[in-house]
Amino acid sequence: MNKRLASLLSASFVVAPAVSAVELYKDETNSVNAGGYIDVRVIHTQDQTEVVNGTSRINFNFERKLKNDWMALALVEWGINPVGSSDIVYNNRFESIQDEFLYNRLGYAGLLHEKYGQITIGKQWGAWYEVVYNTNYSFVWDGNAAGVYTYNKDDGAVNGTGRGDKLVQYRNSYKNVNFTLQAQLKNSEFYTCDVTNISESGCQSLWESGDSAAQKVEFNSTLGGAVTYKVTNMLTLSAGVNRGEFDLTFGDGTTRSVEDLIYGAGITWGDIDALGLYVAANINKNENHDTDNLGRLIKDAIGVETFASYRFNNDLRSFIAYNVFDAGDDYVIQPNFNADPNDVFKRQFAVIGLHYFIDTDTIAYIEARKDFGDFESTNKEQQALMEQSEDDGIAIGFRYTL
């Protein structure tokens, strides 16, 4: 396979760490590979110590040679929970707990051509992730400032910046430039109320009664794009944007549109898997794109992620990461849960870690997180809830890659 075709294929599997696979079947036309890993760890955070699942997953990759130099491809990936359900689920999922042994992470199919590029349809990593994923190499506390895992650290499915649902995506490259364009084609509708302790069905009833404190929200298609430029073998630059729109209809009949927007850039030096120094950073500006730890939509914020590591000759890789997601004060769109307009939300933390490569695909690790966040509210109960999921912590784990 030539380098350009390999580059397009590798962009389809933008995950951390680098993809490893075992060949299950291959003939002149078809190939099937299996990949993934089991990641288990002991973590102490939020005053509890438990054995928990990390980001364990299994995937199957299918390729088929077609006529005229075309190739068909497909991938399915499931997250797996080898240790059972747990009260602490922190891998971007403080609130989105997965009790199932298997749950959907990725699933798409498409066509690939060396000249004409690649088009895929399904649940896949969004174009925005290509801008910022190079800071996402902490195993336990990966970044929550880059606008990927939106809606209180979930998987970014809703607005297509993480593992986006229902994406149509086109990729191609020219010399040292790779680019991705995508459209998220979906129709979603839900009800929300500026009232505490109310179910969605109760909120819908309130909306149907004509109460202005209730809103019907339509959040449908989104658009996104990213460009990556490999300046040298060591230096890579990236930039991108993702946009959607909420259409709100209040119970009293008034309407309002809210733009969901994120844009930014990243820079990377080195190769995370190679010996020596690796450094990456990215910055983004976002509007109505994410929520605070109470689920309230943030009007605008700035996110910065930094990551630096060094891999030694003795199979050790040390790293430090520092992330800031600053919504400041006056970030809550009013009225909303009777919030104080001067509430402050600034997620800020550092992570240090050490990864020991027992062999290429077997890693033991220890990571620690220190919180420097600033969460302020006149409602002290709400402030405590915002602070809880941003606690310090330490974890020891083991990752076995196929």
Image (cartoon, grey):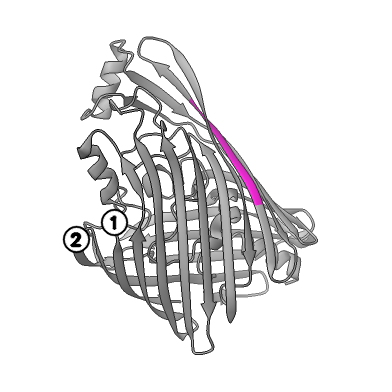
User: Which residue, given by chain and number where applicable, does mark 1 sit on?
Assistant: 391
Q: Quadrant of the C terminus?
A: bottom left
Q: What range is drawn magenta here?
A: 239-246
Residue 206 image position (x, y, % from top left): 27, 17
Above or below residue 60? Residue 151 is above
Residue 75, given in percent of the width and then of the height, sits at 53, 60
Q: Which mark is residue 272?
A: none
| Residue 382, percent from left and from top | 24, 38
Residue 221 in sight: no
Amino acid carrying mark 1 in the image: Asp
Magenta region includes residue 106? no
Tag 2–tag 1 contact (CB < 8 Å): yes
Q: 214 above or below 52?
A: above
Residue 362, how many percent across, how many down?
43, 81
User: Is 54 located above or below residue 188 in the figure?
Assistant: below
For badge 2, the amino acid type reads Asp
User: Within the image, what quadrant is residue 355 found in?
Assistant: bottom left
Tell me the element at label 1: loop
Residue at position x 50%, y 54% in the image: 107
Q: Secondary structure at mark 2?
A: loop
- Residue at x 43%, y 50% (from the top left corner): 155
Q: CA distance from mark 2 to mark 1?
A: 9 Å
On the image, which quarter does residue 243 sit in? top right
Report whether 50 appears left or right of 184: left
Task: Residue at 69%, 71% (x, y): give it.
Answer: 234
Looking at the picture, tell me which residue is in the foreground, 15 or 103.
15
